[in-house]
Image (tube, helix red, strand yellow):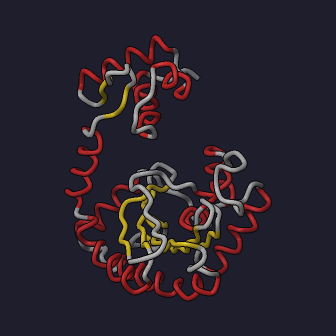
Amino acid sequence: MSLTIIERCLSIVEVLAGHRQGLGLGEIAEKAGIPKSATHRMLTALCDLGYAVQLNNRDYRLTLRLPGLGLGFLSDTGIMQECQPTLDALAQEVGELVRLSVVENEGLIWLGKSQGARGGLLVDPVMGRRVVLHATATGKIWLSSLSTEDALRIVFRDGFGSPGEHGPNVVQTVEALLAELSRTAERGYGIAQQEAEPGISAVAVGIRDARGARVVATLSVAGPSARLTPERLAEIAPLLHRSARQLEGMENLPGFSALQLLTEAYPAPAK
């Protein structure tokens, strides 16, 4: 199926979003799967509109116009103003990085964070990136809330990745994934131990909508595996559940209502 003009343009934007130093025309065309001539036309339009710029070495990169629009929209919703105190309190209590993600277009995107660690190795992912679902505690807890059919369809869409792309313990087969999602649903929280990346572990719980019908966001704690042992992850899980319930209790506030509006366009059938 051929891509529309809008789909091609957004594909180029997504390619450039992963290369802050910029990319050449040929590389962009190859990664986006679009002919060079069409890629050049799209890049010219993006530059004319101020969303991209061509550097002195002829490479292209994004400007800050798109992030500015996104941050302005996020600020207007009031989500983070309402959620940040809960994230900060939990981060101080556990002494690790706390992250909030939200469901978006059959996936999850990192939305907010609070760093509780004050020394040693710090984990500080870039906000705004999509979550690698099968390799993270956050992804697992959301996938476990879906039907098996939907969970597999979404993971197959993104793929398991190539060997060495993630951590040494990441699941690589359908059988392993289904077993992990079953364990996640049973215990009520997701864990990842050196799966998204080497040396990092995490635990996550879901945040449900006002009706309790769907997981619309997740709350997680991540840090070095040396500190976040299996025993420590189990200790943190009840604290995450408590904080998630606090966030769910904000359902009548404008920001939480906006969060649910953001996710309602992508309903996911529960089990």
Closer to the camera in the image, 6 or 60: 60
Please state if 164 lies on the left or on the right of 2 as rendered.
Answer: right
Residue 113 falls in image quadrant? bottom left
Near-viewer residue (179 or 51):
51
In the figure, is residue 154 to the left or right of 179? Answer: left
Q: Toward the viewer: 249 or 201? A: 201
Q: Nearer the viewer, residue 257 or 192?
A: 192
State whether residue 174 appears in this view: yes
In the rendered image, which quarter is residue 256 located in? bottom left
Asked whether residue 271 appears in the rendered view, the answer is no
Query: In x, y percent, where is residue 189?
Result: 58, 76
Quarter of the picture containing the C terminus is bottom right
Residue at position x 51%, y 19% from top?
26
Q: Is residue 88 left or right of residue 211?
A: left
Of the 4 image quadrants, the one containing the N terminus is top right
Residue at x-position 24% and y-position 25%: 49
Q: Residue at x 72, y 59 (%)?
A: 171
Q: Residue at x 44, y 65 (%)?
A: 217
Q: Is residue 35 above or below residue 232?
A: above
Q: Horizontal and vertical percent for residue 250?
A: 30, 76
- Residue 30: where, in percent of width, then height? 56, 23
Where is residue 192, by image quadrant?
Answer: bottom right
Q: Residue furthest front?
A: 120
The residue sitting at the right extreme is 175
Q: How many marks?
A: 0
Spot occupied by residue 199 in the image (x, y as percentages of width and height): 61, 67
